[in-house]
Amino acid sequence: MSLGHSAASSPYLAHHFEDLEQQKTSAVLGMWLFLVTEIMFFGGLFAAYAVYRTLYPGPFHAGSHLLDVRLGGLNTGILIFSSFTMALAVHSAQLGKRRLLILFLTLTMTLGCAFFVVKGIEWHHKYVEHHIPGPNFHFDGMQDPKLVQLFFVLYFSMTGLHALHVLLGIGAMLWLVVLAMRKKFSKEWYTPVELVGLYWHFVDIVWIYLFPLLYLLGRH
Amino acid sequence: MSTDHVETSASIVSVSRHEHDIDTSNYLKAGYTLKSWLLTVDHKRIALLYLFGVTFFFIIGGILAFLIRLELVTPKGDLVSSDTYNRLFTQHGIIMIFLFLVPAIPGVFGNFLIPLMIGARDLAFPRINLASWYMYMAGALLTVVSMAMGGVDTGWTFYTPYSTTFSNGAVVTAGLGIFIIGFSSVFTGLNFAVTIHKMRAPGMTWFRLPLFVWAHYATSLIMLLGTPVLAITILLVAVERIWKVGLFDPSLGGDPILFQHLFWFYSHPAVYIMILPAMGVMSELFSTFSKKPVFGYEFIAMSSLAIAIVGFFVWGHHMLVSGQSEFAGLIFSALSFLVAIPSAVKVFNWTATLYKGSISFSTPMIYAFGFIGLFAIGGLTGLFLACLGMDYHVHDTYFVVAHFHYVMVGATIMGFLGALHYWWPKMTGKMYPEGWGQLAAIVIFLGFNFTFFPQFLLGYLGMPRHYHEYVPEFQILHILSSAGAMILGIGYLMPFTYLAYSVFYGKKAPANPWGATGLEWRTPSPPPVHNFDSIPTVDSKPYDYRTIREELSHVARA
Ligand SMILES: [Cu+2]
């Protein structure tokens, strides 16, 4: 209680919180709960994937073989590395090192953009090869093209939704960089950095699941 | 320490009064401009914004219900075409469920009361709270716009392949509206959960929370876990409809039953999003109006959580005749019986609360008794429907229509109106006319039963739902139902009138007109902007009437 009062003078404290500790743990809990909703959101898609993969293992293997494992693997590496730079960004914020914070955030954003470029190349390949679901979809092989197309519907839905999350993450980091440049953060208060950090790790983890589920079917 | 606090807040008050001439001692008087309402981050004002929103959309949904009942007076489809009729009941369902029943009690009373009840100055994230109202309004308006764009004819359930392949309505627009409202629901749930975890006043332990707060905590968990699944499901329907690719289309390898699984994974628990807050209201009403602590407090609190958890494992009872495996049907049927236990625990505990209490039949209490009646009928017929054999007989008939109106509409409306009357003095600072209140409560209860009880009979006799033409034998029951709907409509109009009247001409309300416990009654009516001059410390169990009685007699003597 006395701690609360000494901190009450802090310019970072919103009027309805008693102290900075309460304010921060509330924000972090809020972020965790938001990530739980994200898990349920992606969970619906993963459930659809599980059902159709169980129903149609052959066509799913055939579809998976049409994806470029090297590009997918490259993107996996990029995202894992970006999680590392993000962790460094949060660490710098904790220590109140503003320049390092900006540096690591920019690095993480660049990696996010790199992920996007690679993803774009992959999607372009799919377009050229007529693997985008719809009237122009084409597949030569033993499997039923309709069912291979179903694999690609899920592929594009899952990677598309994930890419949207990457994009939002990059936007959030851009906002953090602006705040950091305006010297809004301090050792005392850097909650937004921590929240975006949590979000970014979540986006990476989703990809860690997507990569084997989509790219590595039947490749031992 | 505490005097220090009071002094600082008092000085802030005087300064701001001086500068902007704002009265912070009453949240209603802290600004009169439209901007002061539309950009407010005060949870109490946002609650009133929600009250405005849900009332508005309730009226639209009610007009659609009126047209449906009017059409059904005669066996021939003579008022509207079959196609229009499909759109009428679809829009009625979408509006009443997503725009009224889901947000009504949490949006209005959860918002207003949770911070007051736990002794906090606001919800944890006030701006997200305001954003949730805007999302609600945007999504709701989009849904209404879809009505103008030709409407949706799939039923509120959007079953595939109707919604993906065959429907010629504005499915994507309506779906987008519901998707956006879903965000609003998630934000509300997130705000409540964090607030209840982190912002409780000193001494306000989990088992000292009012049961209203426990119910909202359980509700917010369902909102957080269920809503995103509905969101992704709508998104997939939109993908299939826009790009004509088959996720649920059997001719392209898709599985329409998968849609039903995903849809009901949210939409069964959604029933508890509607009804748990109403149950929370009931706990407060039964205690206050029998002047006794709630019987079995811990059991009621835990039964809310149990309902939230078990509620996630029963969705398949909506699909007993859909072609899912018989074995799955058996399991879902058994689990559905299980979820009746915590509901029954609540009902028994409320009735036990009445035992040897000094019961007063004030308006909110009449709604509470109404709740028990409607919920018991609705809940028990739910068990009929959860039986495999019975469900084969009455599936897709008016029996189902009657059941879900009793359980989710009846119970939620009773909760909503009960809460509205009970906390009206706190929210507006005015008393409503008691006699009119009691009369309206009785009219609504009778009208409701008059409307929906005949539908059980209709359904049992074989009248299918979703049809606007029927065999003449059913006409008498349909006329009864439509006549009941008129009574119900008149019943709904009464509170609109006398509550609006009371805002201007009502008697001034004291801080605690009911002699109720709970921190919300220890602050003036209406509360000041920051809720409490200094954050209260809680040192006793909830529903402690002895202390309240002593305090009130002190006030009376002074
Ligand atoms: Cu259900």
Image: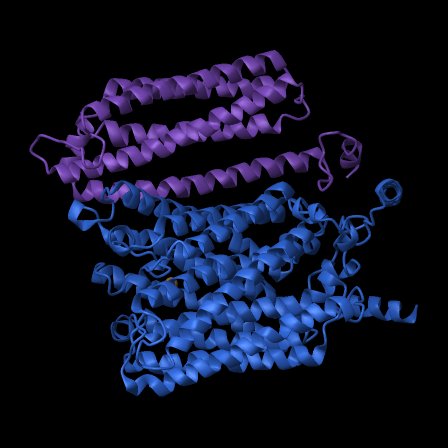
Residue B1 picture quarter? top right
Which color has been applied to chain A in this rendered view?
purple
Of B354 and B19, nearer the camera is: B19
Instruction: Please tell me which residue is depicted at 51% across the width and 61% down the height of the picture.
Output: B100
Identity of the residue drawn at 55% across and 30% down: A195
Residue B205, percent across and down? 66, 52
Q: Position of residue A62 (x, y in %)?
A: 15, 31
Q: Nearer the viewer, residue A179 or A130?
A: A130
Residue B30 visible in the shown view: yes
Q: Quadrant of residue A182?
A: top right
| Residue A158 placement: quadrant | top left
* Residue drawn at (65%, 56%) of the image: B48
- Asked whether A213 or B264 is in front, the reply is B264
How many marks on residues? 0
Q: Is residue B80 above or below residue A219?
A: below
Q: Is residue B274 above or below residue B200?
A: below
Residue B328 in the image: state x and y as whole percent: 25, 59
Residue at 48% from the left image edge and 78% from the top image edge: B485
Q: Which chain is blue?
A: B
Quadrant for the C terminus of chain B in the image: bottom right
